[in-house]
């Protein structure tokens, strides 16, 4: 009967994985046989395996069904089958958090952990500690103490490790077991000693550490344990920089046995160096450098990689690290070659000259039998190589691009996109290569990397626009990724109408309407509308196509088609600009919140779009040059912007509720030096008639507690300070915020800029640095901050106009104002553009902030919005 | 199951297996009774621990959840689910009602104050859908009879209104679990009903 059952199961699996098509409900149904007597261990084992498999696949179990299965499982404790019992322990651990009343097995587990079967005891302890909470811990405390001093090493180490886990939960109870831990240590069992030291580290007050260090050093010879102990020590004290420094000094002087521990030390040291911004003459740096001469390759690599990744490293400091990596490049071990070339690849952009020294070795790696190493070598060469070698390298890489995995293809694409920025003239080679890659098979991440790369080439380089768009058009003809298709359609809508022959894109777009899913069809309709709006000769045919789209089976597609149809038929430039080119420029979470608010408080008035906070311009412009594709890995979901978060925070303060919607929040301005007693930075929030200054203060003195902290502001102009909201208390190292409300002058609208002199006033109470216990009485004190400036930019919000030309036309001539300014202090065109943008705080459109080289004149398009809802559009030329 | 098992059953080599639930309020002596019934040789490996157990029954800690124990008599093999009697775990009893083929209900006969609580729990048990319509034998131990102010088994059965149980065989006997007195009588009765 058992046989038959198994056979049936295998058939159902019908493949390499017998658990492939498991149904949760079917498995739970099967779990009912746990209730049968006598128990059939083999069958039950199989079902438990299925349950654990499902749990690990991320299948969601409801509380009721999980509890039911769990209770059925508890009956299996009747069986004395060893395998089954241990499977039960596993199930308990897996279900500890999803089932109710898991404590039901407590007594069964304590029985097993004190029983005579050593095989049960260790696992039972670990399972028990998973189901135990603070209140229950008292009940099993006695057993735990016994287990820690047990003679069987596996039991004792299970108990020690479990107690380590429980330290997080109930420190006070575990602390009482220190005597047992000590007793365990006095036995000569090495495993126990080590575990004991680990428990000790958690339990002892920091004052005992000086005693434990030598203990650690002499007792813990086993290599990995030294590593674990070091890791633990570090985690215990990572918030205390001084302690970490001390620890590092101790270990770097005395040396360690374990290479793992050395690697850990190097990491800690480099992190500390980075935090303290310590100079490279510090002993920590010397230590890392000395590790380059360690006998373990692992340690040498770690040290080299730490040095190479350090910010602001000089060429002289880099040289030994790079030469070590260079040595690794010719190592017979593939892992070492891989590690070395990967590290070189990463830093190739930062220190090209240092990496160039390895070029010869990298060239040898191009033909490496390991394709991953070869890929990394080629991409590194691409990053550092000269323009002339690009063609050769591209040919080389295309010979085996189909043999490497997607992940490395992405690396190749990243290298290409970096290369395009460096050598714009090579775009035709790149574009060809990319389009070939686009045609090959590949996953979503890979395709997205290519598409992003092509798009960035198009944006950087107008000459490549036509070919790039053609490649993309071809790609969407056979594209299974909705996200990419919609993205490309949007791009086509934006760029297509302005190409010399827009009509050829229409066919590709309309094919989408016929062939694709709803989301893509809707995007295609929007793209079509943009063609119709911008090209008068195409308008009639676009209208015909729109007519067809109005018959679509999907609501969204029909709605869009109907809407665009009506707008297009009006044939008005202003309408086109407002509704087709430049859509809503509000923040989506803000819009959602406002609409929700509106539905909660129904009023006669129609919903006013102007109450919705504007979307702050996306930061894609600041894309770092090194990793243009990496930025696309950010979460897709529209996270609430910084401004939305501030809006929420300010709305929580009663004094500021009547101010209306937040117009703009500035970037934080530092009002103190970085290393002073108190660190203060200010964020300027602009409202319709007021400004709120948010002072984020941090107290860096651990023997002081500041209370009632407020910032006194003396304006130079007609600004009026209305109200202060002090920060109630400012303990050591916990930032707090104080607010000051200022009314803008009504009578003089031109008085936009103003300087405030700021003084921080507060009550000081001295306190004990260790306990944080403050004295009873304090004294008033003040601290002079740097002056704070309010500038034009604080009153202007950036608005992104995707189609600047249309928006400019829409405004019309009568509002146009022309003035000429002489910018005397700037020397280059680029500097002038940057200065203007940052002074006015407006959004550059159409990438006009990028100044091409060797030009004498440049037109800058800026868009922005002023407080009383006036849109500014500025067109500046030089 | 298999042929061999059946053969063993016919020859009387294999004992019939019975699942028994051991219920009752906390501190009534359930775990002590079960430990007494367990053969002592089952804990040879931990002699000291076992010795300790028998010497001082008060050393037994409250059961949390349940534990499963097995013991054999001349004709039956018992698997006992020793359930926790503490108030907050009593609602977990019902998970195990289905497979119980007999119930041992332990009462602390010196605890007059909580006799009503025991009666209430008993009534809930008897009215549970998994128990109500089955003719399962219930054995009552009026435990701790050695204590001076302990009630007699007759008095206990009156207080619990045991005479109202008409559709199930039941039996009450006084016991002293620490010394093991009266337990064999109860188990013999349980064997006879089956």
Image (tube, helix red, strand yellow):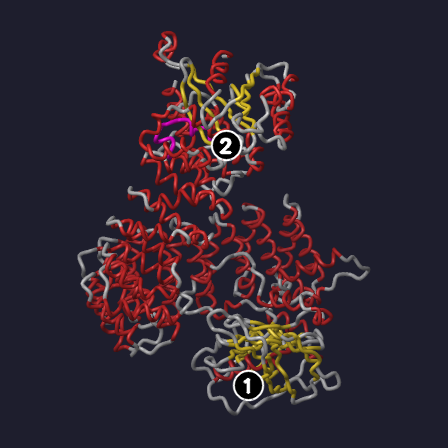
* Residue that sits furthest to the top in the current view: B10
* Residue that sits furthest to the right in the current view: A604
Residue A72 lies, in percent from the top left, at 49, 29
Residue placed at 67% from the left, 89% from the top?
A: A717
Whether residue A366 is visible here, answered yes or no, is no
Mark 2 closeness class: few <14, some 14–19, many ≥20 residues within 10 Å: many
Q: What secondary structure is found at the residue carrying circle 2?
A: helix
Q: Where the N terminus of chain A falls, by quadrant?
A: top left
Per the image, the residue denoted by label 1 is A786
Position of residue A484 in the picture relative to residue A195 (left or right): right
Whether residue A77 is visible here, answered yes or no, is yes
Q: Which residues are magenta?
A: A71-86
Q: Answer with mark 2 or mark 1, whichever residue precedes in sequence.
A: 2
Asked whether A78 falls inside the magenta stretch, the response is: yes
Residue placed at 40% from the left, 38% from the top?
A: A90
* Residue that sits furthest to the bottom in the current view: A824
Residue placed at 58% from the left, 29% from the top?
A: B149
Position of residue A468 in the picture relative to residue A727 (left or right): left
Q: Nearer the viewer, residue A538 or B93?
A: B93
Q: Nearer the viewer, residue A782 or A292?
A: A782
Per the image, the residue denoted by label 2 is A71
Query: Separation of disc 2 and disc 1 at Cα?
Result: 67 Å
């Amino acid at each position: 009967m058992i046989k038959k059952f198994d056979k049936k199961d295998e058939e159902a699996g019908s493949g390499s994985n017998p658990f492939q098509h498991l149904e949760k409900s079917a498995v739970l149904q099967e779990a009912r046989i746990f209730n049968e007597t006598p128990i059939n261990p083999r069958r039950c084992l199989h079902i438990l395996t299925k349950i654990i498999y499902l749990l690990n696949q991320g299948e969601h179990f409801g509380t009721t069904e999980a509890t039911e299965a769990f209770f059925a499982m508890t009956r299996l404790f009747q069986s004395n089958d060893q395998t089954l019992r241990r499977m039960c322990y596993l199930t308990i651990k897996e279900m500890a958090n999803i089932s109710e009343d898991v404590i039901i097995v407590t007594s069964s587990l304590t029985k097993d952990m004190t029983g005579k079967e050593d095989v049960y005891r260790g696992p039972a302890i670990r399972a028990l500690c998973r189901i135990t909470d603070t209140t229950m811990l008292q009940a099993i405390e006695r057993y735990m103490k016994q287990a820690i001093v047990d003679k069987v090493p596996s039991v004792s180490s299970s108990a020690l490790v479990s107690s380590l886990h429980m330290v997080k939960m109930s420190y006070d109870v575990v602390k009482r077991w220190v005597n047992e831990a000590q007793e365990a240590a006095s036995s000569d069992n090495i495993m126990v000693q080590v575990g004991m030291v680990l428990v000790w580290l958690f339990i002892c007050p920091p004052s005992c550490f000086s005693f434990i260090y030598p203990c650690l050093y002499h007792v813990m010879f086993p290599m990995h344990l030294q590593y674990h102990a070091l890791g633990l020590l570090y985690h215990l004290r990572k918030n205390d920089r001084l302690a970490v420094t001390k620890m590092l000094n101790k270990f770097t002087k005395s040396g360690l046995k374990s290479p793992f521990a050395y690697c850990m030390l190097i990491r800690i040291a480099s992190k500390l160096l980075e935090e303290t911004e310590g100079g490279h003459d510090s002993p920590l740096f010397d230590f890392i450098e000395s590790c380059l001469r360690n006998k373990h390759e692992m340690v040498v690599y770690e040290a080299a990689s730490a040095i190479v990744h350090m910010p602001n490293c000089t060429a002289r400091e880099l040289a030994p690290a790079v030469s070590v990596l260079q040595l690794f490049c010719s190592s017979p071990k593939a892992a070492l070659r891989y590690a070395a070339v990967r590290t070189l690849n990463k830093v190739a952009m930062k220190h090209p000259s240092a990496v160039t020294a390895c070029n010869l070795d990298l060239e040898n790696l191009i033909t490496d039998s390991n394709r991953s190493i070869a890929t990394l070598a080629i991409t590194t060469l691409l990053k550092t190589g000269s323009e002339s070698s690009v063609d050769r390298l591209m040919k080389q890489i295309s010979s085996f691009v189909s043999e490497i995995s997607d992940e490395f293809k992405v690396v190749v694409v990243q290298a290409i996109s970096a290369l395009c920025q460096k050598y714009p003239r090579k775009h035709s080679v790149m574009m060809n290569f990319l389009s070939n890659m686009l045609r090959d098979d590949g996953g979503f991440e890979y395709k997205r990397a290519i598409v992003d790369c092509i798009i960035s080439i198009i944006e950087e380089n107008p000459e490549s626009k036509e070919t790039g768009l053609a490649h993309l058009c071809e790609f969407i003809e056979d594209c299974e990724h909705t996200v990419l298709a919609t993205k490309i359609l949007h791009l086509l809508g934006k760029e297509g109408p302005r190409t010399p022959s827009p009509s050829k894109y229409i066919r590709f777009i309309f094919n989408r309407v016929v062939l694709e899913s709803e989301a893509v069809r809707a995007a295609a309709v929007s793209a079509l509308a943009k063609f119709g709006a911008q090209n008068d000769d195409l308008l009639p045919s676009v209208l015909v196509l729109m007519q067809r789209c109005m018959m679509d089976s999907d609501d969204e597609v029909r709605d869009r088609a109907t809407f665009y149809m009506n707008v297009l038929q009006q044939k008005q430039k202003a309408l086109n600009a407002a509704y087709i080119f430049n859509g809503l420029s509000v923040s989506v979470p803000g819009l959602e919140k406002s609409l929700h608010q509106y539905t909660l408080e129904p009023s006669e008035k129609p919903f006013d779009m102007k109450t919705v906070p504007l979307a702050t311009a996306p930061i894609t412009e600041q894309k770092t040059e090194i990793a243009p594709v990496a930025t696309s890995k950010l979460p897709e979901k529209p996270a609430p912007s910084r401004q939305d978060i501030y809006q929420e925070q300010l709305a929580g303060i009663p004094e500021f509720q009547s101010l209306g919607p937040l117009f703009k929040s500035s970037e934080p301005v530092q009002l103190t030096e970085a290393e002073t007693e108190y660190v203060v930075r200010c964020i300027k929030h602009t409202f319709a008639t007021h400004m709120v200054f948010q002072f984020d203060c941090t107290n860096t003195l651990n023997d002081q507690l500041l209370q009632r902290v407020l910032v006194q502001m003396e304006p130079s102009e007609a600004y009026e300070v209305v109200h202060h909201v002090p920060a109630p208390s400012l303990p050591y190292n916990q930032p707090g915020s104080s607010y000051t409300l200022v009314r803008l002058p009504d009578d003089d609208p031109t008085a936009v800029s103003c300087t405030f002199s700021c003084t921080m006033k507060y009550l000081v109470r001295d306190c004990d640095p260790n306990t944080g216990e403050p004295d009873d009485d304090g004294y008033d004190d003040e601290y002079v901050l740097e002056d704070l400036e309010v500038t034009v930019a604080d009153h202007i919000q950036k608005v992104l106009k995707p189609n600047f030309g249309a928006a400019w036309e829409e405004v019309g001539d009568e509002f146009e104002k022309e003035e000429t300014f002489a910018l005397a202090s700037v020397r280059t065109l680029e500097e002038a553009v940057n200065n203007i943008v940052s002074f006015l705080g407006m959004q550059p459109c159409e990438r006009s902030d990028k100044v091409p080289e060797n030009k004498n004149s440049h037109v800058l398009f800026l868009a922005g919005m002023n407080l009383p809802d006036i849109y500014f559009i500025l067109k500046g030329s030089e | 199951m298999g042929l061999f098992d059946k053969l063993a059953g016919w020859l009387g080599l294999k004992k019939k297996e019975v699942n028994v639930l051991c219920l009752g309020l906390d501190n009534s002596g359930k775990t002590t009774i079960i430990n007494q019934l367990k053969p002592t040789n089952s804990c040879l490996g931990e002699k000291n621990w076992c010795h300790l157990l028998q010497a001082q029954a008060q050393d037994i800690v409250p059961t949390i959840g349940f534990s499963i124990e097995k013991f054999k008599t001349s004709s039956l093999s018992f698997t006992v689910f020793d359930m926790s009697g503490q108030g907050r775990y009593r609602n977990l009893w019902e998970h195990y009602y289905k497979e119980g083929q007999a119930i041992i209900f332990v009462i602390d006969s010196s605890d007059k104050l909580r006799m009503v609580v025991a009666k209430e729990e008993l009534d809930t048990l008897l009215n549970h859908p998994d128990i109500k319509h089955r003719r399962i034998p219930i054995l009552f131990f009026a435990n701790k009879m050695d204590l001076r102010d302990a009630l007699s088994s007759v008095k206990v059965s009156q207080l619990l209104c045991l005479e109202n149980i008409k559709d199930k065989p039941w039996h009450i006997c006084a016991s002293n679990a620490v010394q093991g007195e009266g337990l064999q009588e109860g188990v013999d009765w349980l064997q006879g009903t089956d």
